Amino acid sequence: RRSSDLAAYREEATYGPDPSMFRANCLVQTTEWSACSKTCGMGISTRVTNDNRECRLEKQSRLCMVRPCQSDMKETIKKGKKCIRTPKVSKPTKFELSGCVSVKSYRAKFCGVCTDGRCCTPHRTTTLSVEFKCPDGEFMKKKMMFIKTCACHYNCPMDNDVFQSLYYRKMLGDMA
């Protein structure tokens, strides 16, 4: 017999629920992160989870920045192209939040723009803890979304309409 003849009789791997979802008397559930509340500049992304000791539903939030507001990316779209999905990252920059500045510089990715009516939004993201130093000398840590990939599509939220964007566009779960 050839090995290919046996292929039909091999036992198939089956996939059940992820064992890490189960705890004593608790089925862990976590929603996808919502779209960022702003199309440019610093915004908020949220999700709901019961992944805690009490198995109690809680709302989690993280900072997010889809793209800086001050940049005009349409100028960087190459001739013959209609979109720039994830523009090249220029130099490491610091984030600002309510007058506080991130301690470290980050070479963050941002989503680009299109000239044909499509919008580019985060597709795969990760969450990191960012430490900020405030003018009064105090430090604070905030969770922040970092973009891994963006997708360009016609399913665009209205300008900064948080509820519209929450309804229409969810980000795929965090990638480690």
Image (cartoon, rainbow, N blue to C red):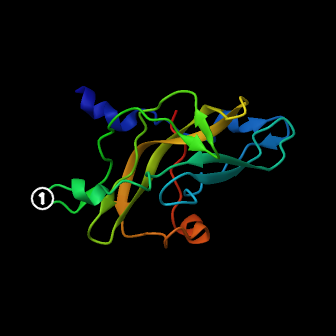
Q: Position of residue 48 (x, y in %)?
A: 71, 52
Examine the rendered structure and indicate whether residue 161 appears above or below residue 125. Answer: below
Drawn side of residue 11 relative to residue 18, left or right: left
Residue picked out by circle 1: 79
- Residue 55: image x %, image y %? 83, 42
Residue 15 image-quadrant placement: top right
On the picture, is 12 further left or further right than 140? left
Q: Residue at x 79, y 38 (%)?
A: 52
Q: Does 40 appear above or below 147?
A: below
Q: Is residue 149 above or below residue 161?
A: above
Q: Is 14 in front, or is 44?
A: 44
Check the picture and name the quadrant holding the N terminus: top left
Q: Position of residue 137 (x, y in %)?
A: 71, 29
Q: How many numbered tags mark residues here?
A: 1
Question: Is residue 84 left or right of 143 when viewed as pictured?
Answer: left
Name the residue type under label 1: Lys
Tag 1's secondary structure? Answer: loop
Image spot of residue 71 (x, y percent): 36, 53
**Point 26% across, 67% down: residue:** 115
Q: Can you tell which quarter of the image residue 17 is in?
A: top right
Residue at image coords 17%, 60%? 81
